[in-house]
């Protein structure tokens, strides 16, 4: 995959992101956020959780690109919205931050549980999160990024280049929020946004792969949990059916890259120790065991043993409960 060219100087942000207070931004002032203790040594195996925070009713014709060519009648379809948590004895890593209250309401999305509330139900305070992986810059994946003032954000360089350049056109911004793109610019200026290319080893056992397709720099997160390799496909695979039947999603920046990603995910799934997790499929809540406690209705354990959150001074990744599911 060809990496994007060098970035220009990011312009200063002119507007505060809706819903974010000055307190939320406090950790972004001054020196860049460091990775914190434990970031360069192995922790215990990762626990991987998927949290369903939203949903909506849609149709197959609205979800699959050029659906009419398949010669099938249209039908209702549910789209769920998730973010993911990795944690171990050293740190918590958040994968995406869900849509904001304003961004979801503007598009008629249903909030099952506010993402920040869901995190607290898991025993995780936003101020204690030191690392957020942003798989791509759509509104339903970066909507609450400003509420993690102490976290370094990680994004594909191709994704940043697009959304701070040609991505400002109305046809693209229908799935993004201006204030949230400004948040990325602001973090880039302050040194709290790390840009990665191609395949990047983020932590021991955590690898990011830029596959593009859905957006110019869509990331997939690979997590080694001991017995299992978990593939958090995010929107490289909204529904399992996309890869199983080679049916691209309706929103695509590069359809050939999307097909390539499906083929790669199928290849990964052929390994008996690999679990692929789709980004919006309601079936995720059926394939994996439910969490107990306050999050029982909206969180599942993809892999790893249940763990308590790390102490506030640590930067943590957690271990997964080993479960094998087909693609």
Image: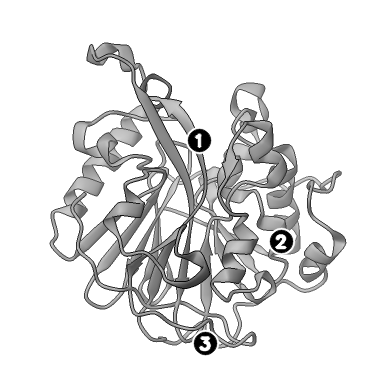
Task: Point out the tag, 2 or 3, that comes first from the N-terminus.
Answer: 3
Please state the horizontal and vertical placement of residue 192, each as a whole percent of the image: 68, 64
Q: Looking at the rendered structure, which numbered label has been put on residue 315?
A: none
Looking at the image, which is closer to me, 4 or 71? 71
Please state the horizontal and vertical placement of residue 217, each as a whole percent of the image: 48, 44
Determine the secondary structure under disc 2. helix
Across the whole image, how many numbered discs are drawn on residues?
3
Q: Residue at x 85, y 44 (%)?
A: 15
Looking at the image, which is closer to me, 3 or 190? 190
Q: Residue at x 59, y 32 (%)?
A: 175
Q: Can you say whether 247 is above or below 262 in the image?
A: above
Q: Residue at x 74, y 45 (%)?
A: 182
Looking at the image, which is closer to me, 28 or 238? 238
Residue 147 in which image quadrant: bottom right
Please state the horizontal and vertical placement of residue 128, each as a whole percent of the image: 65, 76
Residue identified by numbered label 1: 56
**Residue 67 makes an appearance in the image:** yes
Q: Looking at the rendered structure, which numbered label has been put on residue 38?
A: 3
Asked if the residue under mark 1 is in contact with the one under mark 2, i.e. CB atoms within 8 Å, the reply is: no
Q: Can you say whether 81 is above or below 226 in the image?
A: above
Q: Residues within 10 Å of mark 2 (few under 14, many from 20)?
A: many
Q: Looking at the rendered structure, which numbered label has been put on residue 147?
A: 2
Report the Cα–Cα distance between label 1 and label 3: 39 Å
Report the Cα–Cα distance between label 2 and label 1: 24 Å
């Amino acid at each position: 995959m060809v990496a994007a060219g060098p970035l220009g100087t990011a312009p200063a942000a002119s507007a505060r992101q809706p819903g974010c207070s000055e307190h939320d931004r406090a950790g972004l002032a001054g020196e860049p956020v460091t990775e914190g203790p434990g970031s360069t040594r192995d922790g215990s195996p990762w626990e991987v959780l998927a949290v369903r925070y939203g949903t909506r009713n849609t149709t197959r014709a609205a979800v699959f690109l050029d659906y009419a060519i398949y010669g099938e009648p249209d039908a209702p379809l549910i789209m769920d919205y998730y973010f993911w948590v990795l944690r171990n004895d050293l740190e918590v890593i958040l994968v995406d931050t869900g849509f904001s209250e304003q961004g979801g309401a503007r598009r008629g999305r249903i909030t099952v549980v506010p993402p920040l509330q869901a995190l607290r139900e898991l025993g995780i305070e936003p101020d204690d999160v030191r690392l957020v992986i942003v798989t791509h810059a759509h509104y339903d994946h970066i909507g609450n990024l400003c509420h993690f003032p102490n976290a370094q954000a990680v994004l594909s360089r191709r994704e940043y280049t697009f959304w701070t350049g040609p991505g400002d056109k109305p046809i693209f911004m229908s799935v993004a929020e201006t204030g949230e793109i400004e948040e990325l610019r602001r973090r880039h200026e302050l040194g709290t946004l790390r840009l990665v290319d191609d395949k990047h080893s983020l932590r021991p056992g955590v690898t990011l792969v830029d596959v593009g397709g859905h957006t110019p720099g869509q990331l997939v997160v690979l997590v080694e949990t001991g017995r299992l390799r978990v593939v958090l496909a995010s929107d490289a695979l909204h529904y399992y059916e996309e890869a199983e039947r080679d049916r691209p999603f309706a929103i695509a920046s590069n359809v050939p890259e999307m097909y390539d990603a499906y083929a790669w995910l199928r290849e990964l799934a052929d390994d008996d120790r690999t679990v692929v997790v789709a980004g919006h499929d309601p079936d995720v809540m059926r394939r994996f065991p439910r969490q107990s406690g306050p999050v029982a209705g909206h969180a599942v354990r993809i892999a790893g043993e249940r763990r308590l959150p790390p102490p506030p001074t640590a930067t943590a990744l957690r271990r997964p409960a080993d479960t094998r599911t087909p693609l």
